[in-house]
């Protein structure tokens, strides 16, 4: 009398058999996989990993004529020079304020937009509203800064509306609101795409049941829609919080004037000026590396904090 195989044993054997067949197939057709993977791997190595060798410049008194191998090694002198600079605290505080305020004010906006878009029943109206919201994302940063300068100039529409003659671009206290508000206007609509897509997985039956039970709008969002986008919100928050120090210099530099430098000069613009304008390559590389290290530390710290607050779920 033959013994019957258990279901668990059958599943284990079948899974091992599939894995074996996959390995055999890959071994036989390795040239095909190499053909498709090689360009991606080569581009990643050339443009992502090879440039990391330039980090050595931060520890040298770099001379372009002598190259990296021939330049004098100075250790951490460039880092000490930056952190002992009288303007170090101002650059760091300006960068953190611009990033943290932008995160606090800008992060919830795409989520709110996604909730509002999800309430629109008509597909045609929803598509038109989404088109209007997504359009600013395709405006160049420099063009956006030009629009902002025109709107806020002494003879611009804003001053004309309020019958004033204030040059907002020269006010240090106005730089951060201008930077953050213009950034929200440009990117909030596009950032809401991910949340809108996640909301499409929310159960319509649960939503209808909640409405029948008398749940108001906030209760419907809290019980039905929020669980559908919670994981996406957590991931996006960790990524954005981990990039707090990574502010591109383009927009800050384009909105910068001689009179608002006290609040507009950040680490990214300082690196650009010291490296490309002054030719101090070693020092600017050290400042950029310092910025990257702070970013990595923040990313790890925020991820750990979110894991503890979110039942162990993080990146």
Image (cartoon, grey):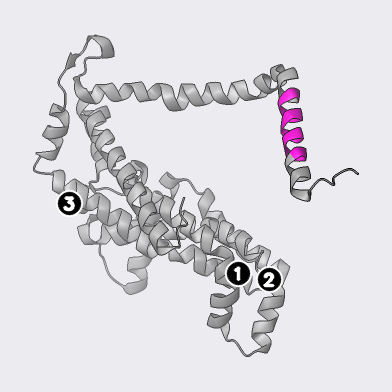
Q: Find the residue positioned furthest to the front.
A: 1
Residue 260 visible in image = no
In the rendered image, the vertical position of residue 102 relative to residue 59, given as above or below = below
**Who is closer to the viewer here, 213 or 99?**
213
Residue under the image location 43 percent in, 25 percent down? 49
Earlier sequence position, callout 1 versus callout 3: 1
Residue under the image location 26 percent in, 53 percent down? 96
Earlier sequence position, callout 2 versus callout 3: 2
> Circle 3 is placed at which residue position?
262
- Number of marks: 3
> Circle 2 is placed at which residue position?
203
In the rendered image, the vertical position of residue 65 relative to residue 50, given as above or below = above
Say which mark, if any, is on residue 158: none
Residue 249 visible in image = yes
Say which mark, if any, is on residue 117: 1
Left or right? Give the position of 39 relative to 287: right
Which quadrant of the view contains residue 61? top left
**Who is closer to the viewer here, 299 or 182?**
299
What's the CA distance linking mark 1 and mark 3?
Answer: 40 Å
Q: Position of residue 267 (x, y in %)?
A: 25, 42
Q: Secondary structure at mark 3?
A: helix
What's the CA distance linking mark 1 and mark 2?
Answer: 16 Å
Part of the protein shown in magenta: 13-24
Left or right? Give the position of 124 relative to 193: right
Image quadrant where one finds the N terminus: top right
Whether 223 is among the magenta residues is no
Left or right? Give the position of 216 relative to 101: right
Label 1 crowd (10 A; few <14 / some 14-19 / many >=20): some
Label 2 crowd (10 A; few <14 / some 14-19 / many >=20): few
Q: Position of residue 25 (x, y in %)?
A: 76, 24
């Amino acid at each position: 009398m033959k013994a019957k195989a258990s279901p668990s044993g059958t599943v284990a054997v079948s899974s091992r058999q599939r894995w074996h067949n996959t390995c055999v197939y890959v071994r036989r057709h390795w040239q095909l996989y190499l053909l498709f993977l090689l360009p991606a791997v080569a581009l990643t190595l050339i443009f992502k990993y090879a440039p990391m060798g330039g980090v050595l410049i931060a520890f040298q008194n770099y001379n372009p004529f002598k190259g990296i191998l021939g330049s004098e090694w100075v250790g951490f002198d460039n880092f000490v020079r930056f952190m002992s600079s009288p303007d170090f605290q101002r650059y760091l505080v300006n960068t953190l304020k611009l990033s943290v305020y932008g995160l606090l004010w800008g992060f919830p906006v795409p989520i709110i937009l996604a909730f509002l878009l999800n309430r629109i029943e008509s597909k045609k109206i929803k598509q038109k509203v989404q088109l209007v919201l997504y359009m600013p994302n395709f405006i160049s940063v420099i063009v956006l800064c030009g629009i902002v300068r025109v709107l806020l100039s002494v003879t611009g529409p804003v001053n004309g509306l309020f019958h004033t003659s204030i040059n907002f671009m020269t006010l240090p206290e106005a730089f951060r609101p201008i930077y953050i508000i213009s950034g929200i206007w440009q990117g909030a609509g596009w950032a809401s795409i991910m949340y809108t897509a996640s909301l499409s997985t929310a159960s319509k039956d649960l939503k209808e049941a909640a409405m029948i039970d008398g749940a108001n709008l906030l209760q419907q969002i809290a019980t039905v829609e929020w669980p559908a986008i919670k994981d996406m919100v957590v991931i996006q928050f960790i990524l954005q919080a981990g990039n707090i120090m990574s502010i591109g210099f383009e927009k800050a530099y384009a909105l910068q004037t001689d009179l608002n430098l006290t609040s507009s000069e950040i680490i990214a613009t300082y690196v650009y000026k010291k490296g490309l304008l002054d030719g101090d390559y070693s020092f600017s590389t050290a400042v950029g590396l310092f910025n990257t290290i702070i970013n990595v530390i923040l990313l790890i710290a925020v991820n750990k904090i979110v894991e503890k607050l979110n039942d162990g779920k993080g990146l």
